Amino acid sequence: MKVSVPATSANLGPGFDCLGLAISMKNQVIIRPSKFHSVSLKGEGSNNPALKDNNMFISIFNDFYHNLSHKKRFFRFEFQNEIPLSRGLGSSSAVIVSAIASAYAIEGIKLEKDKLLNLALAYESHPDNITPAVMGGFNVACVQENEVKYIRKEIPKSLKAVVVVPNRAISTQLSRKTLPFKYSKEDTIFNISHSSLLTAAFMAEDWDMLKLASNDQVHQKYRMKQMPELFDVQKTALKEGALMSTLSGSGSTLFSIAHADDSKNLEKALKFRFPHFRVFTVDFDNTGVRIEI
Ligand SMILES: Nc1ncnc2c1ncn2[C@@H]1O[C@H](COP(=O)(O)OP(=O)(O)O)[C@@H](O)[C@H]1O
Ligand SMILES: N[C@@H](CCOP(=O)(O)O)C(=O)O
């Protein structure tokens, strides 16, 4: 049984906790029944011994598997991870979604995507990563009575994501604690209007509107101050042809969107200017979680 889940970029500037999209960078796990418990880790996190023993995927998987099957069985878990951990690309959401989907799949129980999404919500209160991780595409989401309400839109292949991944991890949970408790009326109205305009721009495929609509007053400036070089990355990306450039989730990744024809030059310019960071150009993912029995 194989499950794969895409990386996600949340907030997209002003859409704090409500806007997010999926990109073609994924974590994949193959799970096989085994005589004893074993874990193989390749790719991102493979040099982190803690992930072998204290693994969030296995803990969530076991919780669901035991509740579903009432059986004690051993499995071999083969992880192939492409999503950098704690870099604002939704690694925790990918793990949560993948673990729940895997437990149902290995037990042969069909799980509708909407139910999977609401089960994942119990582990991550903001829906802007888990929703695109499950559904793919661009999503606008909110939570109403413990259920995620969302509308999604596919993103055309004519656009690419260019992500700049620093070597510094930022814990989402800790990063959220650094944000202000209160916001001015001006900042509140600024973000409501800009996230509304950004949503409309994605729905209408008005890509020239992304740059203006993706401005934010609620979280980016506080977070990017922790790593000021990110302001240079953002400025360079916008100068070199990005349609928009925002902090990905809680960071440290800087996420940009460009027309496919412009993405090669953008990637080249970012790699030249910031050789100490990893730079990837990827398609968008319009499918979300994939399960192969
Ligand atoms: N591939 C993985 N396998 C197991 N746990 C993971 C994996 N990726 C992320 N995690 C868990 O999620 C945590 C990172 O979550 P978070 O700080 O929200 O980062 P991100 O911004 O990538 O979502 C890690 O410390 C680890 O506990
Ligand atoms: N809205 C959240 C998004 C966190 O995304 P992640 O990829 O950093 O987990 C926030 O900004 O805290």
Image (cartoon, rainbow, N blue to C red):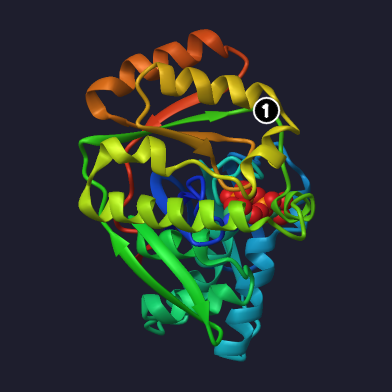
Q: Residue at 40% across / 51% down in the picture?
A: 22
Q: Quadrant of the C terminus?
A: bottom left
Residue 145 placement (x, y as % from top left): 54, 87
Q: How many marks are shown on the rendered structure?
A: 1
Task: Note whether 273 is above or below 210 in the view shown.
Answer: above
Question: Which amino acid type is shown beneath numbered disc 1?
Answer: Asn
Q: In terms of image quadrants, where is residue 265?
A: top left
Mark 1 = which residue? 167
- Give SS at disc 1: loop
Residue 264 placement (x, y as % from top left): 32, 18
Instruction: State whether label 1 is within 8 Å of ligand 1.
Output: no
Q: Residue at 48% across / 16% down in the picture?
A: 270
Q: Residue at 43% across / 12% down in the picture?
A: 269
Q: Quadrant of the N terminus?
A: bottom left
Using the rendered image of the protein, determine whether residue 293 is visible from the camera's viewpoint. Answer: no
Task: Note whether 140 is above or below 46 in the view shown.
Answer: below
Instruction: Work out which residue is located at the far bottom of the displayed protein and give it.
Output: 70
Residue 139 placement (x, y as % from top left): 38, 60
Using the rendered image of the protein, determine whether residue 113 is visible from the camera's viewpoint. Answer: yes
**121 or 17, nearer to the observer:** 17
